Image (cartoon, coloured by chain):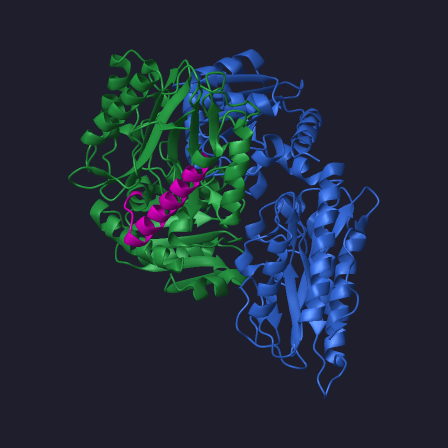
Chain colours: A green, B blue
């Protein structure tokens, strides 16, 4: 499936969302987008640009691009914008002319305090835009594009979902290789090396930076969190935890899985470990059962968090779930607590058609236990699109 | 050479530059830096972060990092910041506490209208920072970090220059393969396919997006500029133009080379083509002879531009040269005309130790002619670090 299909589907969705939200115009304003990428570019352009460039979508369905002269051909060849204009010296007069033609009541631009995926406009580019629109009525009509970009990223099209299912399928194949690979005496770093080699062999990339994808935690001495794998050696009786995923044509998997290394003393996981594992399963299920289109994410997180703390474990220090797609943290409403660093994201209604991770963990004396799976949100609920782990893998 | 060396060298340079510029404190403020990357992160951090994170360097040489709890271990392991603090719920109280301790007269943050490499702060993050510092004296002390980041990127360290020379060397090897490969009947796309395969075979990436790296122009029918290679077929008597480079450990080459395909009628390039080629050589040399540390880039561009127009050719619609390094367009003062879209960049003094491209082209009836080489700027002048093409390669 050519990459172009997604941008074309997404531009159609953008027009629908502009109508829903009663917003006249969405303006993506970028330069040197390989250096300071705006996450919206992957959705509605699909290639980088060098000079200041404006990509405009209106509620009437017009698609206008303004780009530097040398880049006109690239944008025309891509065929996503029916009206491609170019400039040589300065973008401002041409941008003002386009806005005068469209005369929008609002111009949504890509900034947001709460949603990274809607925050691609740099502050320097914001200042350029404000200067270009000074002494025009449009200066006062700038609003945040988060109400457009959030739903646009969240609502996965069929072509996007197909890629995500493929990314999950390949990640699960790699987890099966981990089961065959791990044993006492191997280091955390060995598992990472094996997964990197297998990922490369398939011509793929990891879902996030390879230095901590996978995260590997072997036993209780390993520091859980985002640190990279170390030289720590797996011993009999250890829990082994992996947080890993691969990207398939840009779309990402993000899964956590658990193994137990049998020891002579404990050929099966001890009761305390089994209880901790089951608590994680129960907490994720408590969240998933509340998750459906329209709910506020914090209520979903609270049900999971409550399950963990009621069982006497310390609460996890992150959100239960985040949107997943083109990015591992894909933006959109967060399934997280109402902590200051999350802004108002946990209070926004969850979008139908969105894909979320559900993930949490607890510490045990044999190591960190955490699980993570992916669900697709519908009006009725949330269904797994990854094979949720329900038993420790005993090796 | 491990990647860490560069960040460590760059942090030392940053302290020098803060002293030179009499600026107390430089604050890089980011979140989800894989999604909305700040170009400064490659220079002074070297890995991505997820939660809001602050990386602070002071003129006293203090290096303080504030990151989300799960990322403390990663930043400590990297060893670049001697004071690593973490938070769980909100970054603002900890950031205010750090600034109270340091009490800087100015806090330089990463925004710039003129320099992309200094413009990594998103507008949403700017708003978060301003909100965090509201009702503190520090709100009024925010300034642009462009006077720090510009020189920091420009002044190449020995480790950086070694990587750039290696990138140029490999790119020249690939150009030699092009000489053996091109012939009438091949398409532009064939040349790109060969270069992509050879680049991958070496485990490298192209210096910019592969869909237009290389740019390939075969004959007069080919549209010069940034468009990708097409199915256009090379014919006897055509000029073939390539704009291409590979990255070596992050550092990029960016070179343009010219071939002439002999025909029965013209086994050697016709006089008009030779004159155009020589005019490009002369124009680049006219610029290079004026280039040294401290000059304003527009004067260098003007000398080259004047050579082109005096010879009766249309002036090129871009800058004569741009900084090169970690990025293909590396920021810093531009060797370009004083056009509105370049802001004040062509008026800034060129830094000693910086690497520039020198590039320009003219149209001919046999195709586009353009050349590009790399020079290192010293106090005395500018010396080539790539083997400047001085004759058409006749195939």
- Horizontal side of A59 relative to B267 (left or right) equals left
Vertical placement of residue A218 versus B220, above or below: above
Is A115 situated left or right of B140 in this image? left
Position above or below: B216 against A336: below
Q: Residue at x 56, y 14 (%)?
A: B103
A162 falls in the magenta region = yes
Most distant residue in the left direction: A380
Q: Residue at x 58, y 47 (%)?
A: B343
Residue B305 seen in render: no
The image shows residue B331 at horizontal and vertical percentages of: 62, 44
- Which image quadrant is residue B284 in? bottom right
Residue pictured at 67% horizontal, 17% vertical: B60
The front one of A141 and A122 is A122
The quarter of the picture where residue B348 lies is top right
Is residue B144 rendered magenta in the image?
A: no
> Which quadrant of the rendered structure holds the N terminus of chain A?
bottom left
Q: Is residue B232 left or right of residue B334?
A: left
Residue lying at the far bottom of the rendered structure: B265
Mainly helix, strand or loop, the magenta region? helix
Residue B391 sits in quarter: bottom right
Which of these two is toward me, A380 or A85? A380
- In x, y percent, where is residue A22? 22, 47
Q: In the image, which residues are magenta?
A: A154-178
Expressed as whole percent of the image width and height from the top left, the position of residue B160 reads 71, 40
Q: Does B13 appear above or below B76?
A: below
Residue A172 at least partly seen: yes
Q: Residue furthest right?
A: B380
């Amino acid at each position: 499936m050519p990459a172009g299909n997604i941008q074309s589907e997404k531009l159609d969705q953008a027009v629908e969302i502009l109508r829903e939200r009663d917003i006249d115009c969405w303006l993506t304003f970028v330069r040197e987008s390989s250096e300071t990428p705006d996450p919206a570019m992957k959705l509605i352009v699909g290639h980088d640009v060098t000079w200041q460039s404006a990509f405009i979508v209106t509620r009437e369905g017009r698609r206008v691009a303004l780009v530097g002269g040398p880049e006109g051909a690239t944008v025309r060849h891509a065929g996503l914008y029916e009206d491609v204009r170019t400039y040589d010296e300065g973008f401002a007069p041409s941008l003002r002319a386009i806005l005068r033609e469209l005369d929008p009541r609002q111009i949504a631009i890509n900034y947001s305090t709460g949603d990274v995926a809607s925050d691609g406009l740099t502050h320097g580019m914001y200042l350029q835009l404000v200067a270009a629109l000074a002494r025009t009525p449009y200066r006062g009509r700038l609003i945040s594009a988060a109400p457009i970009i959030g739903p646009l990223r969240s609502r996965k099209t069929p072509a996007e979902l197909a890629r995500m299912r493929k990314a999950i399928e390949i990640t699960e194949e790699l987890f099966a290789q981990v089961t065959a690979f791990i044993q006492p005496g191997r280091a955390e770093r060995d598992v990472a090396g094996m997964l990197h080699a297998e990922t490369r062999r398939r011509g793929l990339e990891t879902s996030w930076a390879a230095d901590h994808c996978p995260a590997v935690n072997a036993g209780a001495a390993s520091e859980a969190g985002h640190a990279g794998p170390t030289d720590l050696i797996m011993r009999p009786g250890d829990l082994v935890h992996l947080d890993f995923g691969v990207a398939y044509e840009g779309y990402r998997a993000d899964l956590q899985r658990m193994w137990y290394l049998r020891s002579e003393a404990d050929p099966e996981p001890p009761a305390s470990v089994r209880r901790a594992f089951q608590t994680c399963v129960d907490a994720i299920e408590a969240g998933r059962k509340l998750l459906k289109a329209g709910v506020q994410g914090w209520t979903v997180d609270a049900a999971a968090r409550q399950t963990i703390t009621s069982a006497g474990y310390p609460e996890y220090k992150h959100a239960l779930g985040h949107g997943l797609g083109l990015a591992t943290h894909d933006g959109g409403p967060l399934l997280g607590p109402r902590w200051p660093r999350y802004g108002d994201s946990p209070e926004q209604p969850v979008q139908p058609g969105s894909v979320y991770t559900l993930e949490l963990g607890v510490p045990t004396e044999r190591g960190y236990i955490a699980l993570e799976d992916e669900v697709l949100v519908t009006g009725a609920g949330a269904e797994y699109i990854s094979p949720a782990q329900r038993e420790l893998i005993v090796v």
